[in-house]
């Protein structure tokens, strides 16, 4: 299952101007900030979709361990190494991230796409998706970019459809602490 949070619309007065947000590649030093945002996004995007217990105590620590491992392991060849894209304000505040995983079948999986809750709807998710498509085209020319999203995450589903994703599969995923849940796969054939 791809872990895509809920890019959505927000009327928040402090939604950043997309021009004031930049995208950069991240690394091991960013693990703690990414883990915090990941847990925060899960709690917002998946509330009412997965059991509250799956989003409760221990989630931040679990995400911390996951990101520490993901961002410090040696994947070997550069072609097999995932990419981390960070969306930041000028002051360095992390407002979103995307994580890309080259797959053995020649595709690239956008395994995470999250925007800080309260800042969604300002174009940050679209910026990250565009950066993910550009990263894929640059590092894996011709490879399709795809992601998986929980079917009931309606905001994210609508966002991916607005961004030109083609629904290429319907299936099930084993969500941590929630069991089997229905999901969709979206693909961008030409990043």
Image (cartoon, rainbow, N blue to C red):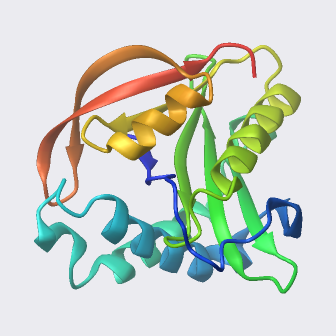
Question: Of 143 and 131, which appears nearest the observer?
Answer: 131
Q: Does residue 31 appear to the left or right of 6 in the view shown?
A: right
Residue 141: where, in percent of width, then height?
83, 19
Q: Does residue 141 appear to the left or right of 49 in the view shown?
A: right
Residue 77, visible in the rendered structure: no
The quadrant of the picture occupied by the C terminus is: top right
Q: Does residue 4 appear to the left or right of 44 in the view shown?
A: right
For residue 87, what is the image quadrant? bottom right
Q: Does residue 21 appear to the left or right of 158 in the view shown?
A: right
The quadrant of the picture occupied by the N terminus is: top left
Q: Is residue 28 above or below residue 114?
A: below
Residue 76: where, in percent of width, then height?
71, 45
Q: Residue at the spot x=69%, y=76% of the render? A: 94
For residue 129, what is the image quadrant? top right
Question: Of 162 and 174, which appears nearest the observer?
Answer: 162
| Total marks placed | 0
Q: Residue at the spot x=22%, y=57% of the render? A: 176
Q: Is residue 2 above or below residue 66?
A: above
Q: Residue at the spot x=56%, y=74% of the render? A: 12
Residue 41: where, in percent of width, then height?
43, 67
Q: Is residue 58 above or below residue 19?
A: below
Residue 9, visible in the rendered structure: yes
Residue 127: where, in percent of width, then height?
75, 48
For residue 151, what is the image quadrant? top left
């Amino acid at each position: 299952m791809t872990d895509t949070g809920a890019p959505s619309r927000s009327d928040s007065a402090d939604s950043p101007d997309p021009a004031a947000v930049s995208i950069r590649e991240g690394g091991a030093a960013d693990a703690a900030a990414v883990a915090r945002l990941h847990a925060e996004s899960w709690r917002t995007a998946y509330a009412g979709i997965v059991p509250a217990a799956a989003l409760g105590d221990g989630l931040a620590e679990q995400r911390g361990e996951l990101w520490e491992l993901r961002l410090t392991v040696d994947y070997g060849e550069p072609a097999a190494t995932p990419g981390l894209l960070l969306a930041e304000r000028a002051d360095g505040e992390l407002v979103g991230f995307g994580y890309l995983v080259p797959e053995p079948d020649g595709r690239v999986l956008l395994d995470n796409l999250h925007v800080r809750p309260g800042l969604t709807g300002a174009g940050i998710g679209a910026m990250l998706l565009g950066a993910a498509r550009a990263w894929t085209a640059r590092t894996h020319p011709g490879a399709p970019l795809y992601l998986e999203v929980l079917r009931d995450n309606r905001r994210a589903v609508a966002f991916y459809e607005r961004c030109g994703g083609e629904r290429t599969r319907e299936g099930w995923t084993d969500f941590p602490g929630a069991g089997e849940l229905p999901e969709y796969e979206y693909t961008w054939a030409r990043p």
